[in-house]
Image (cartoon, rainbow, N blue to C red):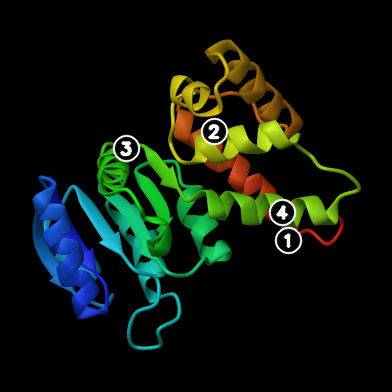
Amino acid sequence: MRVILADDAALVRQGLARLLEDNGFEVVAELGDADRLLNCVSELRPDLVVVDIRMPPTHTVEGLIAAIDIKRDHPHVGVMVLSQHLETRYAVQLLSGDAGGVGYMLKERVADISEFADALRRVAGGGSAVDPEMVSRLLGRRSRRSTGDLLSPREREVLALLAEGRSNQAIAQHLFINAKTVESHVAAIFSKLGLLPEPAHHRRVLAALTHLQTKDLDPNG
């Protein structure tokens, strides 16, 4: 699996490159800024791009905007945003696309290397991997603006695990409940969010995240 890395911190970039190579990935390019990233993707046609958010010249959201541009121009290339920061506005724009193959994870929360490698493979294969902290932030903001919680505590747990890209069976094992119960929770979640079920698992999850972010931005929500 061919990967391009984009991170302005040389030590982080080199350490991540070694980690990926030790887990069977081929790092075909390492970049320290976002300006060259789109051209590099066009030239090298990787399976996956791993990019930080804050990169030169302004160290704000250059990497995230580059990720959005990559998914627009190269929808079959997986994009994993790996950062120390949560940035919901552009992140939701990236995650709500129809192409799939997107992820957003926080560096500090990557504790299990094998799980991280699995998440990268899932994104490269067209799936999703969203850090539960992103889900919690969106859900938390929505809850504070409403008269009561939109979802039950268990449904919030299930949604967070869905956003990580986990299957119903994996969620059942994680929560020590049966798969039928998970199916019921999933159906309830999308019913409460007013979303129709769709065949693409990750698209339903990301649609839910987008819905929550929209409600958060709505002054009447």
- In this view, the residue farthest toward the bottom is 57
Q: Does 8 sit left or right of 86 as displayed?
A: left
Amino acid type, mark 1: Leu
Amino acid type, mark 4: Gly
Q: CA distance from mark 4 to mark 3?
A: 28 Å
Determine the secondary structure under disc 2: helix
Q: CA distance from mark 3 to mark 2?
A: 14 Å
Q: Which residue is mark 1?
A: 217
Q: CA distance from mark 4 to mark 1?
A: 13 Å
Q: Earlier in the sequence, mark 1 or mark 3?
A: 3
> Label 3 near label 1: C-beta < 8 Å?
no
> Label 3 near label 4: C-beta < 8 Å?
no
Up-down relation of residue 184 to residue 192 (above or below): above
Please name the residue shown 23% across and 69% down the image.
37
Q: Which residue is mark 3?
A: 126
Q: Earlier in the sequence, mark 3 or mark 2?
A: 3
Looking at the rendered image, the quarter that the N terminus falls into is top left
Q: Which residue is mark 4?
A: 140
Please name the residue shown 59% across and 17% down the image.
183
Q: Which residue is mark 2?
A: 204
Q: Does 60 sit left or right of 141 as displayed?
A: left
Up-down relation of residue 87 to residue 184 (above or below): below
Can you tell which of label 4 and label 1 is closer to the viewer?
A: 4
Can you tell which of label 4 and label 3 is closer to the viewer?
A: 4
Residue 109, x across and y down, in percent: 42, 57
